[in-house]
Image (cartoon, rainbow, N blue to C red):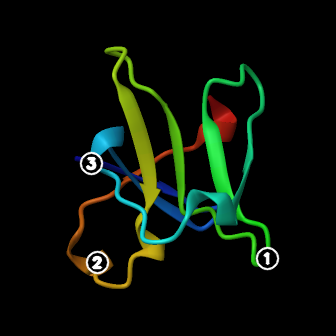
Amino acid sequence: MQLFALPRRGGLLAFVPRDKLVLKTPEANLSTYTFNRHVIRHHFCANCGIAPFGEGVGPNGAAMASINLRCIPAVDLGALTVTAYDGKAK
């Protein structure tokens, strides 16, 4: 599993196959946006603005999900090895 930090947005993303992501609340409770090439669907809470996950297609063509680990209380964030990613500079 790859982990990337997005410090400006406060996200800590883990990338997994989309079929491994199981939602505990209805997806209808989320709002969605896309930008740039519109290939990634970013889901967020319309009430508080937290971005729990996104969906897209990985380099190999498989459906992928990026999960914001800061939205999962059971994850020990201190035990993870994280790669910082400056998407704005890319």
Q: Residue 20 carries which label?
A: 3
Question: The disc labelled 3 sits on which kind of residue?
Answer: Lys
| Mark with earlier residue (2, 3) | 3
Residue 35 higher or lower than 67, as above or below: above
Horizontal side, residue 50 vs residue 24: left or right? right
Horizontal side, residue 70 vs residue 79: left or right? right
| SS type, badge 3 | helix
Residue 75 higher or lower than 11, as above or below: below
Question: The disc labelled 2 sits on which kind of residue?
Answer: Val
Question: The disc labelled 1 sits on which kind of residue?
Answer: Asn
Residue 2 higher or lower than 72, as above or below: above
Q: How crowded is mark 2: few (under 14 residues within 10 Å), some or many (20 or more)?
A: few
- Residue 37's spot in the image, x, y percent? 72, 19
Horizontal side, residue 84 vs residue 49: left or right? left
Q: Which of marks 2 and 3 is in front?
A: 3
Give the residue drawn at x 57%, y 43%.
86
| SS type, badge 1 | loop
| Mark with earlier residue (1, 3) | 3
Residue 11 higher or lower than 15, as above or below: below
